[in-house]
Image: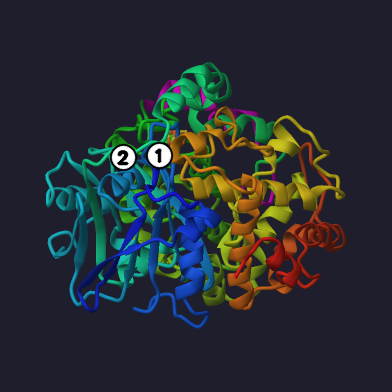
Amino acid sequence: MSQEKLYGYNGRIVRINLSKEKISTEKIPIEWLRKYLGGRGLAARYYYEEISPDTPPLSPENKLIIMTGPLTGTTVWGSSKAHIVTKSPLTNIYTVSNAGGHFGAFIKKAGYDGLIIEGRANKPSCIILNDNEVKIANAEDAWGLKSSEAQKVLLDKVGSDKGTVACIGPAGEKLSKIASVQVDFPGARRGGSFGRGGVGAVMGSKNLKGVIVSGSKEVEIAQPDKLSEYLRNNLSLLKETTGYHTKYGTAQYIDSLYELGAYPLMNFTRTRVEEDLIARLSSKIFREEFVAKDVACYRCPIACGKYAKPNMEEYKDFTSKPEYETIWSFGPQCGVFDYNYIVAANNLSDDYGLDGISAGYVIGFAMELYEKGILDKEKTNGMELRFGNSEAVVELTRLIGERRGFGEKLADGAVRAAQYIGHNAEYYAMHVKRMEFTAYEPRAFYGMGLAYATSSRGACHNVGGWTIRDELLKPKIDRYAVKGKGQLVKTIQDVRGYVDSLGICTIPRRSLNFTDTPSPEVFKFVTGIELDINLNSIGERVYNLERMILNREGVNRKDDILPERIMREPIPDGPAKGHVLSPEIFNTMLDEYYTARRWTMDGIVSKDIKIALDLP
Ligand code: SF4
């Protein structure tokens, strides 16, 4: 990458020190763009350089590193993504979180590729990026407001229709370790969130309510005609491969995962309920009875976002955009099979600025403890926390967001709640590295267990590897096979590594040829750059860099582990009945994974792979 003029990139970031009220613009080392592309990879590179392993996550020394990719804000489908990398207060290690919507595109339009936010403001503040101008402004008028209200107040500071906002709600201000940063709140633009890992608490710890971005610059494309032609020629492939996303959003997966016995219910205690209960949760019911509006991220024709409206009078104003994951967390994870309550709880979760996966998860976790008698009304402040108590799910979401009553005990995630509850409660907390599980039963497809265990940020289906694509939906590999899973998980993690670094969404990636055997064509049309290694190797480099950071922070084989329940208790019912990820099975897969990665058997990035991938 020796060219002088950059296409696709602005080539610079802005660094904002809130303690010193100092703002500076820096060029991004060209070498880093070549090696890490942008987005997640570039953010990890800055983290590697700037955040020492002993940095307390909620201290002024921690940083919010927000990066876009070369494709973010272009006409490429799904070019909406921005990533936040920071030290997580939930897991106490490196974390990465991404959001779609319009935030990333507007960072590019404002003339930057990213921001690094340091220090701590001495009063509630916000950052404004507006066509090359950057300033720190007072945000006392927005402090204390829910995300949707704060978004409007903050956006007014630049003119309400000109840009967008990423901001925290009350949960972030109160330093909940499962707080999110909400993007594009309803009423202005499509919603999204930097959800996982407690990034909202890091923003709150800096006295920062939000970042407002606005601008008019178009991203310059190296070969615009070729790009347009490519997109025209591939539009029918896009429609063919993403049609279900357009109709049902990610809710489409509920039916098939339940059918396969891979949809965990009631804190992973079963996979079967009465037919009439699960039928109420079908994606068809969701589409026909609850979806009020389809919404899209920046210039995305797929529009997989589904704004849903409860039809119960009590909740009719609680519109929200639940995804497959949050339908599960506020629904079946808590024994709830009614979209009215799920959409309402999801609305509160977004408005208070919570990670909806962790918030719903921790409520279902508490419900199991209550059912088992480990929790009682004295500890829950009088709440009857039985599975299926829909009103309690809505109310407890509010209490977690406000850190009030029993919600205070759940507001820092399942592991810390278990420590408060005692009585071996952690046995029932499904987590890896303190990050709660998502809506996939790893005993029903073993690759998912390995993905949860080895993900760069704790239990995660995205960064860890969405093995469902090869194990369940159109199975290319036996879901209970042990051999081959190490390589499978590595491959999927690496693909996600380069896709996240390009700054695009994973849903349209196939029609852009960003597959397991990718073509760099679209990247080249945008940037004009001929890569000297393939995109998979860049994804592998990004994953290894993240692991180097994790190794430095003390993570090794002992941490790449699944909860005892998953390794000891077989699934009690359904098509996957009897399957368990025993320590023997798990360790065989983990050995194969480390071998495929060329890491040591203790999970440490080896010198050989560092040299091979030209890592620092
Ligand atoms: S596919 Fe959905 S999530 Fe992805 S960019 Fe398009 S609208 Fe956003």
As measured in the structure, the alpha-carbon distance from the residue carrying label 2 to the one carrying label 1 is: 7 Å
Residue 437, located in which quarter of the rendered image?
Answer: bottom right
Question: Could you tell me residue 253's position as x and y percent?
Answer: 60, 33
Magenta span of residues: 265-292
Please give the name of the residue rendered at 26% of the width and 57% of the height, measured from the top-left corner: 211
Label tally: 2
Colour scheme shown: rainbow
Residue 327 or residue 67, whichever sits in front: 67
Question: Contact (CB < 8 A) between labels 2 and 1?
Answer: yes
Q: Secondary structure at mark 1?
A: helix
Residue 100 visible? The answer is yes
Q: Which residue is mark 2?
A: 318
Q: Is residue 453 above or below residue 81?
A: below
Within 8 Å of ligand 1, the CB of disc 1?
Answer: no
Q: Which residue is mark 1?
A: 343
Which amino acid type is marked by label 2? Phe
Q: Is residue 320 left or right of residue 542?
A: left
Query: Going from the N terminus, do you reach mark 2 or mark 1 first?
Result: 2
Q: In the depicted view, which residue is nearer to us: 16 or 418?
A: 16
In the image, 465 versus 417, the foreground residue is 465
Q: In the displayed structure, would residue 314 be above or below residue 603?
A: above
| Location of ligand 1 given as a quarter of the image | top left
The amino acid on which the numbered mark 1 sits, given as a three-letter code, is Val
Q: From the top left corner, tell me how far across and down residue 123 is, in percent.
A: 18, 73
Residue 271 located within the stretch drawn in magenta: yes
Confirm whether the magenta stretch covers residue 563. no
Question: Dividing the picture into quarters, in which one does residue 169 lie?
Answer: bottom left
Would residue 175 appear left or right of 22 to someone viewing this image?
right
- Judge by depth and name the residue closer to the eye, 362 or 139: 139
Q: Position of residue 65 (x, y in %)?
A: 40, 63
